[in-house]
Image (tube, helix red, strand yellow):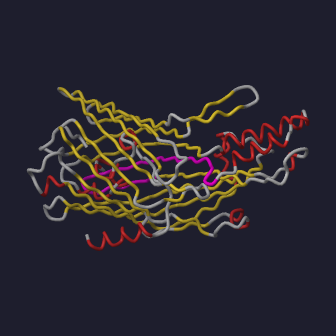
Amino acid sequence: MKALASLLFFLTTAASATPWHNLGPRAMGMGGAHVAIAQGPSAAYWNPAGLGQLFDSSGVEILAGIRVEATGGVLLGANDLNQLAKDCSKTPQVCTTERVNKALDRMDHLGNGASFDGALAVGARVGSGMLFVHSLTYVGGTPEVDHAVNSGDLALNNSKLILRGGNFTHIGYGMGRELGKSGIVIGANLKLIVGSVGYRQMIIVNEDPGPGSIWRYDKNSKTSLAPGIDVGAFWDMRETFPSLPARPRLGIVGRNVNAPTFEQPDAATSAGDRTRFPLNGQVRAGLAIQPYDFVTMAADIDLTNNTTSIDRFQSRFLSLGMELRLHNKGFFLPLRLGLQKNVANADSALAFTTGTSFEFSQFKFEVALQLSPTVTAIQSERVTKRLPNNLAGSIRLAWEFGQVDPGNAALPY
């Protein structure tokens, strides 16, 4: 435990990593608060120590999720500049310095950008071991604003949206083990990561910078391999102190503690980017309590400031969540609610989350949604699209079996 604590402490002071993905509907529905309640087949991602709990479920699962986020006025400014270039080619007199500068100023803001995270995962767990494949994608668009051309010859404006990102497929095996009968569990994942890193520069006056443009990041890409290691610890205090109320649980996890790196495409290095794309170590901690059989409350916080695919935009999530379990004679319906905020960036919108699970025998179908109330209005030639600044969704299909904690039969996880 001392060695694990020293390693995680080092990671909190080291370089940053990719953002944490809210993998799975239960985690997303609870705002991403899952490190201290990592259970069932999904435990390998959130905290491999969760695999070593005495009473837990085995099974197989497949899940998918996406998240999009816009920060600052990047999409609005890029859309305005693209639309203005079209208008100027038809009616030159509308191409005023004031209109051009307004569009450029909307884009030119520290940490401005648009990002996309995606996940597709499959896993099979038996007892305290799990085989898994987690395919995680991170893409970001960073504006590079050209103020040299203001009007008249706007078609020569060289303002860009720089698309960076990668798909990282983690193929691994995780295992957890309790230390005696202390209630303290440690765990680890050993992984082979297949990383495909992409880079592209998009000239805004020539190409439509709409939300679909972010998918074009991999026009230039390079694939390479690297090993990965995750470690985690979990403490169910009730196992240590049986009379302790509310079943408090603590969890901490370090992902990619060996800081694997991947080759950048030639287009990126030619533009001055570094030669290797890093997945540096990241650390997350969580707390959960269960004041009643049917209520679980949890909170997570990133202990590292994590880099993203957007220049100078960091992520450090604070997550709060609650799960209410309604059950009666075989009927079981969980309701999940949560909040998530990127506390490392003031422009990041507060997101509200919700989700539920539909269960029949040992089969589960789960869904979750994440949404921010703030929106960006993007005007095209004919319609106005209002896009939430933070939008995500997740689904999961699983078959689970195994033991349930006899001291809390309401917990099927």
Compare residues 75 and 230 and report the one nearer the observer: 75
Image quadrant in which the N terminus is located: bottom left
Q: Is residue 110 left or right of residue 394?
A: right
Residue at image position (64%, 40%) is 211
Which of the 4 image quadrants contains residue 231? bottom left
The quarter of the rendered structure image containing the C terminus is: top left
Q: Residue at x 71, y 42 (%)?
A: 77
Q: Quadrant of residue 268?
A: bottom right
Q: Position of residue 196 (x, y in %)?
A: 59, 59
Q: Position of residue 175 (x, y in %)?
A: 29, 60
Relative side of 111 to 203, left or right:
left
Q: In the image, is residue 125 part of the stretch drawn in magenta?
A: yes
Horizontal and vertical percent position of residue 66:
51, 42
Q: Residue at x 42, y 43 (%)?
A: 63
- Above or below residue 50? Residue 82 is above
Q: Can you give x and y, in whole percent of width and height, for residue 156 in the image?
A: 87, 50
In the rendered structure, the answer to whether residue 278 lies left or right of residue 242 reads right
View extreme (left): residue: 243
The magenta segment is 110-134
Image height check: is 175 above or below 392?
Answer: below
Q: Nearer the viewer, residue 377 or 282?
A: 377
| Secondary structure that dominates the magenta span | strand
Q: Does 393 appear in magenta? A: no
Front residue (pair 101, 218): 101
- In this rendering, the count of numbered labels is 0
Residue 18 located left or right of residue 63: right
